[in-house]
Image (spheres, helix red, strand yellow):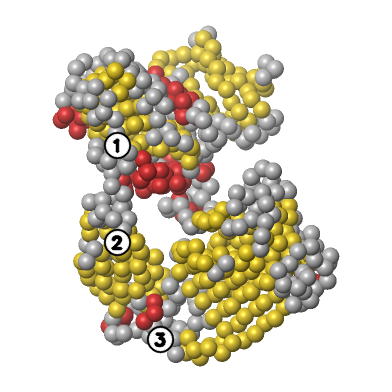
Amino acid sequence: MKKITLLGSLFLSLAIQAQTFTDNFDSYTAGSYLGPQSAGAWTTWSNTPGGANDVLVSNADAVSGANSLHFVSTSSTGGPTDLVRHFGVLNTGQFSMSFNIKVASGAAGYFNLQKTATMGAAYTLDTYFNADGTFAFSQNALTGNYPQATWFNFRLDINFNTNVWEIFIDNVSQGTFSNAENQIEAIDIYPVNGVAPNSADYFIDDFTTTITPYTLPSINGAVMNAGIIGATLTGNMVTPTFDIRNLGSTAITSFDIVANYNGANINQSFTGLSMASLASQTFTMNQTMALVAGAHPLTFTISNVNGAGADGDANDNVKATTITPTTPAAGKMVVTEEGTGTWCGFCVRGAVYMGRMHDAYDGYWAGIAVHNADPMTVTAYDAAVTSMPGFTGFPTAFVDRVAPIDPADMEASILSRVQIAPTALITNGATWDANTRTLNVSVTANFQTSATNSFKLACAITEDSVHSTASGYEQHNYYTANAYGPMGGFESLPNPVPAAQMYYNHVARDIQPSFAGTSTMFPATIATGEVHTLGVSFVLPAGWNENKINIIGLLIDPAGLIDNAGSTTIAEAVGNGLVGLPTITSNTTSDQIDDLFKVYPNPATTSATVMIQLKSESTVNLRILDMSGKEVAARDYGSLNGASSVTVNTSNFQSGVYMVEMTVNGQKLTKRLVIQ
């Protein structure tokens, strides 16, 4: 049965009404759709009760009474059942939701919370009951276990005022978290399991929600989302940061804050503000603190809002988080190699997170952005990264070449790898000849433990602030207009972002002697304390800025993982001095932006650009052939010199693989083009 009650209670000395909704589904007819029987309590994603999105009331299993709801699907995309209950917009006060649930053995369950009444506009929480008996949420790291093939109670308690969300399984707390959205309007119950064989199968019974409204005092500042800016590494200097939400009816113009960590206080006053009622704002303190080993609370306390002393609600004046810094191994540097491309609209995510890792972990981390099918491509490096096990698309990152991950997940991998003691310490030395633009580099490995010649050394060079207004340097951007939420400012930029506005960092320029490295300088066995050096030489094109070049020496272990690295600028490496003479010479111009020709984006959809860079006047012809050898497009360019580009309309091409054939002075060169 469905029941709605209003409960009188006293909340912060303010008279309110708590509204409780319960539904055990026993008053409905089994075998019929829920929506039309519920008098508006339940609807569907498409707002068509009784349609395909609705759920049939079931009497196959239940906790109380005879009925429950049975959600089942074997489609890889889930559904068609898509049941919705609206709560109204909730972003203050408290909310509790509980239900009994039974997930079939080997199957999965799922629901999400929507932020607004417009379904799909914003997801506040995605909850997964996985087929392996674990639960997880897409918006935070909280995970746990649940009992499969038996009924259990799931409960979510939310305090919107303090942004504390707590999960219970059978009344046992599984942990708390903060939610960046911190607002809900509806629950959407949708059977889906993205893991083959895609079995989603679960019952829900005894659904209950309690909404406790909140009446705003005149003046009330709430502390939310306590944290730090900087790497969570032992001994690192970090800056406290926090969010303030105005939970009063009067605008906030000033407040005092105290941050307490490891027994020390940092005090600061913030003035000249104009925070409207219910507005939130992030604040950064003007002092830093040193992280110490172990788990220690960082506590923020707000006071004296608008100079009025105590505010109208003391329950939201304090926010604490526990800081547990990671202790890096001595001399350790972690490397991220990220597959990216200017044609890839999602790859701005990689640029944002690589930038954040640089800001947080500089000195312990080096980033290498390996471009694909654009003017910054290093063909051999790109081929090696995209051939790594598990690589499925762009952007993909490899931290120390361990496993493919989304760039947004780099930090956890970096913190894990930075704790592992390196086999050898890496030092880069160099000489630089500005006239010939020759960069001689020595990568020296000082072995801290014994090893074998299965270890290898390599040297990569990258460049920051790469900028050009030439075709191909514009960055495609799927985050424009907040299409996929905020992304480091790209949500405010167009698609594509004009080349004139783009500056690319961590751009891979070369890797020598190869992606896998070389062990030719190592003896069969290496004793602790031995020192061995790889020497390489690069000739940098005139268009590269030597002041923005980074030298990254790599020690690669027998499994092909990066054991350790060393990153320096040219000036820093020159200061270290060159060890020995280069044994490997690389002409970096042969595989960079002055390649004879490039084709991008690749894969392409409606168009592709062919760029050619000629060092002398040449006759040029272009043909595009399908895989049967049939010519589908052709053009005679006549005599050309220098840089040229042409856009080929591929909108009428069938999906598949084509060959782009460039003939220069009678010599044929080909590149593969994929049309999607």
Q: Is residue 309 left or right of residue 379?
A: left
Please identify the residue farthest to the top as the structure is shown: 666
Closer to viewer: mark 3 or mark 1: 1
Q: Distance between the residues labelled 3 and 2?
A: 34 Å
Amino acid type at image mark 1: Ala
Q: In this view, does 578 lie to the left or right of 202?
A: left
Tally of numbered discs: 3
Q: Can residue 253 be seen in this view?
A: yes
Q: Identify the mark at residue 368; answer none if there is no mark.
A: none
Q: Identify the mark at residue 296; answer none if there is no mark.
A: 2
* Residue 368 rendering spot, x and y as whole percentages: 38, 35
Q: What element carries label 2?
A: strand
Amino acid type at image mark 2: His
Q: In this view, does 512 lie to the left or right of 29?
A: left
The residue positioned 32% from the left and 41% from the top of the image is 418
Q: Mark 1 points at which residue?
A: 421
